[in-house]
Amino acid sequence: MKLKNRFLFFITISISIILSVWAVLFYYSILEEVYDEVDDQLDNYAQLIMTSFLSGSMSEFYSGDGSNNTFELYEISQETAKKKPKLRYYESMIYIKSKHENEPARVLDTYFVNAENRYFALKIYTPILETHDLRRAILYWMIILYTFLLIILIIVISVVYYVSMRPLYKFLDWMRNFDILHPVPLDNNTSVKEFKELCVTANDTLQRIDKLYQSQKMFIANASHEMQTPLAIAINNVDAIVQTDLSEEQLKYISNINKTLMRASAVNKSLLLLAKIDGNVFIEHQKIDISEIINAILPNLQEVYSSKNVSYSVNLNTCIFDINPDLASVLVMNLIKNAIIYTPNNGEIIISCGENNFSVSNSSVDNIPLDEKNIFIPFCKSMNNVNSSGIGLTLVKAICDSSNLIIKYFFENNFHTFKISD
């Protein structure tokens, strides 16, 4: 869940609970005020009736049909009076003769004693149909007000959140587009102290990473360059020794030394090439037909690895990439060579070129897919093979990245496939 959605979710829940509690309290407070007003009127009317009754002037009152205040006045025993509460308010239904129907009414139920110590019960009814209508109206407008406030609050909070968190999203975009080869400092002008500190920390970290990366790249380039000369001298000396009279056992040892030196030289050259790619040395790009490079390279590789008895299925159409010519050759060479090295004896390799892509597939040794997270990491080989330098696919990935090409790996029908497209 995104931070914004999570924030709005909890804010909405919190505000909904607060507004709901407020709405319920407000609603019942309004009803309480309405009923207090009705009860006060009933109480005043009851005092007037009792005063008139005790003074003998009841002729001005009429116990009507319920359309206005209606009352019942009758004598009760002392025992009955003592069982009744002195004053009670409640709601009941009364029959209105003029309308021939029952309507809700508010009732005041009390009793009093006259001078002769006789007890009288008094019930006063007042219709509250208008009060019910008022209650429904209050509830209706409360719901509208509640919904309106909730929507307005969510909109206001969303706007405030977006404005306040804009530096964070700018920082995330900067992180998402960060390129170690072309580092761009974070320019995040804000008045928020925490975001200012984040910007300063990010730029300091960027400088340290860039410095470390440049030092590492320079070390690899210098080390590889310094190693290349002694390796070449050692290989030449081994070749010179081979020309002398040696026993069969000595030739065997010398051959192993030569293979080791050749492999070390190949790794060293690959590291040098990686350093040059990272340094953007190969800036010249042009339209290259990959199918022509495959036709030029494949026969040589087939001859070198003829002992593996691999069958080849080649389907080549024109495939144009905008790429440096030297890097294009290295790309094709490493991809096909990697497929041959890791193809079992009597296996199969499929090479195909389309309009904007080409792929190389090879049959698997153990029917197990490669680890997609690690296959392009230097010296992280999927299987132990002395003929592999461990850096071929790393070179392929670096060339694709520098040439804006996309490389994908997938495993189907016991075949490993690497597909490159623009």
Image (tube, rainbow, N blue to C red):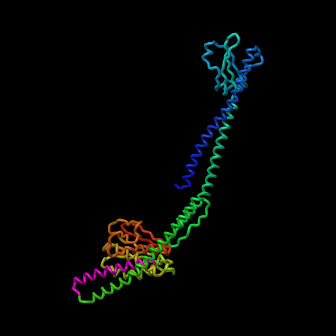
From the viewer's perspective, is residue 411 above or below residue 61? Answer: below
Going by the image, does 138 lie left or right of 358?
A: right
| Pick the front one: 236 or 35 | 236
Total marks in image: 0
Where are the magenta residues, as a range? 246-275
Q: Residue at x 49, y 80 (%)?
A: 282
Q: Is residue 285 visible?
A: no
Q: Position of residue 269 (x, y in %)?
A: 40, 80
Q: Residue at x 61, y 15 (%)?
A: 82
Q: Position of residue 379 (x, y in %)?
A: 37, 71
Going by the image, does 165 lie left or right of 73?
A: left
Task: Tell whether position 248 is magenta.
Answer: yes
Q: Is residue 324 visible?
A: yes
Going by the image, does 280 lie left or right of 190?
A: left
Task: Tell whether position 116 is magenta.
Answer: no
Q: Residue at x 43, y 74 (%)?
A: 396
Residue 25 found in image quarter: top right
From the viewer's perspective, is residue 59 above or below residue 303? Answer: above
| Pick the front one: 375 or 226 | 226
Residue 195 found in image quarter: bottom right
The rendered magenta stretch, by its main secondary structure, is classed as helix
Q: Residue at x 36, y 83 (%)?
A: 230
| Pick the front one: 143 or 352 | 143
Q: Position of residue 418 (x, y in %)?
A: 42, 71
**Residue reaching furthest bottom?**
244
Q: Position of residue 197 (x, y in %)?
A: 56, 61
Residue 364 found in image quarter: bottom left
